[in-house]
Amino acid sequence: MKWLYLNQILGHIGGVLVQGEGNPLVKNVVTKRYKIGTHTLLIDLYKKDKVDSNIFKKSQSTVVVTDEPKDFKHLGDDVIVVKVEDVDEVYWKFIDYYRSLFDIPIIGVTGTCGKTTTKEMIKHILEKLYKVQSTYKSLNGGHRNHRYLLGIDENTGAAVMEMGVDYPGDIIFYIKYFRPKIRILLNIDVYHLIGCKTPELYLKAKAEILHELDPVNGSLILNKDDENIKKIDVSRFRSILYFGFSDKCHFQATNVTYGQGGMQFTLHHQNQSYQVFVPGYGKHNVYNALAAVAATWSAGVDIKEACERLASFNQVVEHLELRSGLNGCTVIDDTWNAAPLSMSVALQVLNDIAGIKTRVAVLGYMPQLGDGVYAQREYARIGEKVVETQVDLLFIVSDQAKEIGKKTLELGMNPGKVYFCNNGTEIYPILKPVLNRDSVVLLKIPHRVMVQDSFKELKEKIIV
């Protein structure tokens, strides 16, 4: 956090001093009473928390901004207390003020899949030039935004924020914090139906990426090949950069091939061509790379330099990560999360790299699909993809995902090659005999299942 004197902050958020005195330096801002510390300002949002006198006694130069000053009266004048009428309103005044202190490129990334990888690619490219603030891994829930914003300080040269959707309004909430001027929409498939209820409402929730974006000065970066993105009205925006494989993309990929450990392609931009290698398999990874180059170019990075940086990018763990397996088999570890689009992509990568080898897929349920009619339709669609990619041996994990296996059987897959399982202990004895140099195994089970003991043991047994 950029250190600020209390009077600087009060000049923007208001309030009346009712206890203590002074103008201490504020080095941190918190919203929970138990997180108070030395040189810390507490904006008292969570009043259910106990006011622990011992914590305050251990801390020096503490300030409380609250609409309940009586809760802190017993602490005495060693704690500065500022009374306000509406602490929630004051909190957002502080957020607006703090954000206004920085005129740096802030990039917001959303999409059904690829957000984390694209965000990490952007960060990797920018870090050669700047100190970069970003969301951590794929931990992008709204309650974490405060700490990410305060992670920006006077030494930060750029920021990149992953913006996920669980419910309508989530992206608007991100935008309220970070006000990104460069925004990326990678793709829109079907997911997060627990919160968004229908594919149509989910699409609208993703379209919130346009919220309060300056139609003249803001930069909008869109996947030109995505059919759902084409349904969004972007006619009022002047600065749109399209990426993809299609003609007339501002950032177009051609000659896409699998290389050693990643994807090779030619990037075309403004009558110039660049040879690119990006670690990680799959055409979706080319889309991620195109979006990252477009975003960093918008932030002032030379395209050639951005492409060169991509070659040294470290693939995100458990995102289609190729691992050496038992008896020389290959394991594709894609166990961070599971959505219909990412599962379909993973099956395609399995097909692309397996060649004549035995294809094995271990597929789990997709947590945010729910169990409604749309969910069943998506599970069936994955079953179709399993057959299309000629999977030889299929394991379905959990009752929620049964529709995948049922669809494959309906389409003629050998019933002796389809197993319905509930734990890793059931899978291993069936899987072990086919693990050799001539087999490739896709693990596509969500993280919340993989942390269970039987699945941790399965993974430990089959990955060397």
Image (spheres, rainbow, N blue to C red):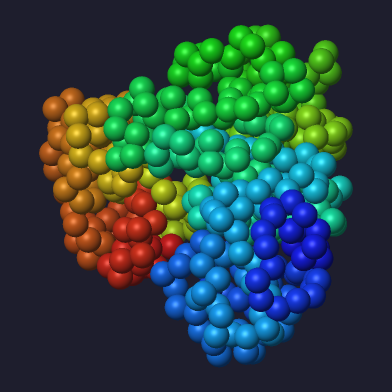
Residue depicted at 76% across the width and 69% down the height: 26
Q: In x, y percent, where is residue 10?
A: 74, 58
Quadrant in the rendering for residue 460? bottom left
Q: Is residue 54 above or below residue 256?
A: below
Residue depicted at 57% across the width and 42% down the height: 174
Residue 410 seen in this snapshot: yes
Q: In x, y percent, where is residue 143?
A: 51, 55
Quadrant in the rendering for residue 455? bottom left
Q: Nearer the viewer, residue 413 or 31?
A: 31
Q: In x, y percent, where is residue 14?
A: 69, 55
Residue depicted at 14% across the width and 43% down the height: 416
Q: Nearer the viewer, residue 297 or 219?
A: 219
- Position of residue 398 in the picture relative to residue 385 (left or right): left
Q: Nearer the viewer, residue 392 or 375?
A: 375
Quadrant the N terminus occupies: bottom right
- Position of residue 141 in the picture relative to residue 148 (left or right): left
Quadrant in the rendering for residue 286? top right
Q: Is residue 429 above or below residue 115?
A: below
Q: In x, y percent, where is residue 83?
A: 61, 64
